[in-house]
Amino acid sequence: MNTTTEEHVDKRALHPTVDKAQYGLAGFLALAGGYVVYDALTLDEAFADQPVQPYTLPFIVGGALVLLGVLLAVATARGNRPEAEEGEDIDLTQGTDARTVGLLALVLIGNIVLIDWLGWAITGALLFAGAATVLGSRNWVRNLAVGVALSVASWYGFYVGLGVPIPAGILDGVL
């Protein structure tokens, strides 16, 4: 057996590569937790007879975030690395399809630009039909029919059911 290969393997075993992005995530968790704890310190006390004060839950959440950040940094320093997820039906060796992502972005931007004028019922249907078409569906009639059903149902669900006003656009008074 070649000794240089054995030496190379031994060096990798002694000095595993460190995933520096994990340190960034650990730092973010610790900073976010620290901010939550700081913000909890600025809350006023509620009535003295309440067993649980308003700052209790933020202290718990902030402390948990700081603890998770520290634990992640320690695990990273020990050489623990997350395993890459294997896709079920995705070829992970292929790159991103920039054309598809760009077309989906255009469909979304079109929805944002037109929603105040046309309203959600119309732009939601166009959003669904456009996204389905970009992702491979070739049945325009079905795409539009499903899009109309979903957008009108969601409009009524938000506007009537939850009381959240969604733009009706040119269909104001009809819906």
Image (cartoon, helix red, strand yellow):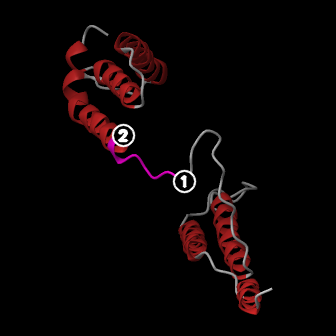
| The quadrant where residue 36 appears | bottom right
**Secondary structure of the magenta portion, mostly?**
loop
Extreme-right residue of the structure: 1
**Residue reaching furthest top?**
174
The spot of residue 71 in percent (x, y) is 72, 74
In which quadrant will I find the N terminus? bottom right
Q: Residue at x 25, y 29 (%)?
A: 115
Residue positioned 72% across, 89% down in the render: 11
User: Percent position (x, y) of residue 137?
Assistant: 42, 22
Cα–Cα span, label 1 and label 2: 17 Å
Amino acid type indicated by mark 2: Thr
Left or right, residue 40 beside residue 136:
right
- In which quadrant of the rendered image does the C terminus lie? top left
Disc number placed over residue 100 in the picture, else none:
2
Nearest to the observer: residue 121 or residue 36:
121
Quadrant in the rendering for residue 75: bottom right
- Three-letter code, disc 1: Thr
Q: Which residue is mark 1?
A: 93
Magenta stretch contains residue 63: no
Label 1–label 2 contact, CB within 8 A: no
Helix, strand or loop status at disc 1 = loop
Magenta span of residues: 93-100
